[in-house]
Image (cartoon, grey):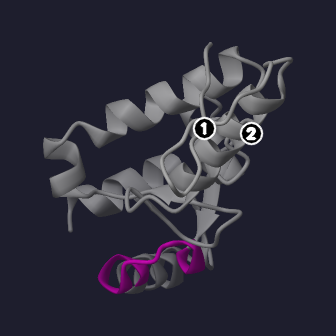
Amino acid sequence: MFIKFNDDAGCFEEGLDTGGPRREFLTLLMSHLRNHPIFDGPLENRYLICNSRAARKDEYFLAGKMIAVSIVHGGPAPHFLSKNLVNHMMGNPSFSTTAEDVKDEEIGKGLQQVGNNLGSGNRFTAGQVEIILLFR
C-alpha cells in the first residue's frame, strides 16, 4: 500500500513509510466510516441502517471494502460496530437486542409492544426482530 498525505496548501508530505503513514491512513479511514450515514446508534455501538441514497451509490459495498482493506493491511478493525451486528454477520445465533437499541421510533415502539405481549420484556432475538420488521 502506498500512502501520500498532503498539507493544507496541497503539497505532498515527504517521508519513508515504515508503517506509520499506513496506520494513520487506516485509522482515519475507520474514523470516517464510523460517522457515515449508513450507521446509527451510539458511536461505540453502531448498527447498519437502511439508507436508500447510500444503497443507490453502492456505499454499503464500499464500506465493506474499506473495512476489509483496513483489516488486511494491519489497520484497526471496525470496533465501532455493535457486537450483536458483528455476531449476526458472522452467523452466530446468539444475537439479542433491546428495544432501546432501535433508533427508529416506530419500530422501537412496535418492539416494545410485542415484547410486552410476549412477556419477554425488551429482549429480542434476530429472528423475532426480522418477523416484526416483515409485518411492519
Q: Would you name the residue on which mark 1 appears?
A: 5
Q: Which mark is residue 24?
A: 2
- Tell me which secondary structure the magenta stretch mostly adopts: helix
Q: Is residue 38 left or right of residue 99?
A: left
| Quadrant including the N terminus | top right
Q: Nearer the viewer, mark 2 or mark 1?
A: 1
Query: Mark 1 packing: few (<14 Cα in 10 Å), some, or many (20+)?
Result: few
Q: Which residues are magenta?
A: 99-108
Could you tell me which secondary element the residue under label 2 belongs to? helix
Q: Is residue 118 visible?
A: yes
x and y percentages locating residue 22 in the rendered image: 72, 27
* Residue at 42% across, 80% down: 108
Residue 94 or 10: which is nearer the viewer?
A: 10
* Cα distance between the residues tagged 2 and 1: 10 Å
Q: Is residue 119 left or right of residue 76?
A: left
> Which residue type does callout 1 highlight?
Phe
